[in-house]
Each structure stands twice: as C-alpha cells, then as structure tokens.
C-alpha cells in the first residue's frame, strides 16, 4: 500500500525544495536550481502517473515518459536562456544578487523623498 505512494512523496519533497529555492534565495543561480527542481518534480510526476494509470492501453502507458521528454527539452532551452541572462547580469553589475538592485532603488527613493521634504521646509 505504501510502495505506490513513494514516488508521489518524492515529487512533493522535490517541489517543496524547489519552491523554497525560488522564494528564499537571493542568488540568481540558486533560484535557477529551484526552478530546475520544480521541473524535475513535474517530470517525475508525469512518469509516475503514466505508469500507475489504470488505462491499460499502450498510449496510457507511454504518455508519461513522452511528455517527460518534452519537459526535458523545454527545461534545457530554459536553462540556456536563463544562464545567458545571468551572465549578462553579472557582466553589467558584477554580481548576481537579485535583491541588491531592489534595495538600492528603495534607498534611492527614500533619499529622494528626504531631499524633497527638506527642500519644502527651507
């Protein structure tokens, strides 16, 4: 009874780690690894559902692995584009911390607001 649930448990763990990697990390490469974990969880889920589906036909048995091949192709294209963006980001800024730009914009806006209120007081 527990044996068929193990792949689903692994999918849940991979998806949870992927979501944590996306939401809690500041580094672009680590966020990309989180996305890849989510794609791996989706591929494992497709294969598991394809193998455990009760259809009994050849189309039902092969639909999961075939869809997973498409998923792997899309993931490969996604990683190439994302790494190109990360390299361009590194060349432009010298780092790939995604929150550093947001922090500097917030500081700039607060400095501008202080200058505007000081100018009105004078």
Image (cartoon, rainbow, N blue to C red):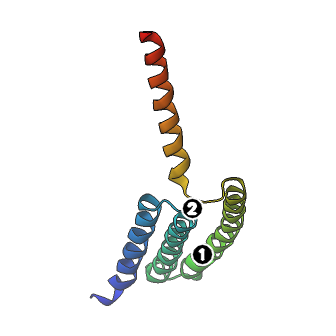
Return the residue nearer the eye: 67 or 117. 117
Q: Residue at the far front: name it.
A: 122
- Residue 85 against residue 66 in the figure, above or below: above
Residue at 64%, 69% in the rendered image: 75
Residue at 49%, 45% in the rendered image: 103
Q: Secondary structure at mark 1?
A: helix
Q: From the image, tell me which residue sits under label 1.
A: 68
- State the image coordinates of residue 86 (x, y, percent, origin top left): 66, 61
Quadrant in which the N terminus is drawn: bottom left
Quadrant in which the C terminus is drawn: top left
* Earlier residue among tags 2 and 1: 2
- Residue 59 against residue 29 in the figure, above or below: below
Q: Secondary structure at mark 2?
A: helix
Dot 2 crowding, Cα within 10 Å, few <14, some 14–19, many 20+:
many
- State the image coordinates of residue 102 (x, y, percent, origin top left): 52, 44
- Residue 109 against residue 30 in the figure, above or below: above
Dot 1 crowding, Cα within 10 Å, few <14, some 14–19, many 20+:
some
- State the image coordinates of residue 12 (x, y, percent, origin top left): 37, 73
Residue 43 in the figure: left or right of residue 4? right
Return the residue nearer the eye: 114 or 38. 114
Q: Quadrant of residue 71?
A: bottom right
**Callouts 2 and 1 close, C-beta under 8 Å:** no
Residue at 66%, 58% in the rendered image: 94
- State the image coordinates of residue 82 (x, y, percent, origin top left): 66, 62
Return the residue nearer the eye: 13 or 107. 107
Q: CA distance from mark 2 to mark 1?
A: 25 Å
Return the residue nearer the eye: 122 or 111. 122
Q: From the image, tell me which residue sits under label 2.
A: 28
């Amino acid at each position: 009874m527990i044996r068929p649930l193990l792949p689903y448990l692994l999918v849940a763990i991979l998806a949870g780690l992927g979501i944590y990697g996306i939401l809690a990390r500041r580094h672009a490469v680590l966020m990309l690894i989180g996305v890849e974990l989510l794609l791996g969880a989706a591929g494992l889920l497709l294969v598991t559902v394809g193998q455990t589906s009760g259809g009994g036909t050849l189309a039902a048995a092969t639909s999961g692995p075939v869809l997973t091949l498409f998923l792997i192709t899309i993931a490969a294209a996604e990683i190439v584009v994302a790494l190109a963006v990360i390299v361009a980001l590194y060349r432009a800024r010298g780092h790939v911390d995604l929150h550093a730009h947001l922090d500097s914009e917030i500081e700039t806006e607060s400095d501008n607001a202080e200058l505007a209120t000081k100018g009105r007081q004078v």
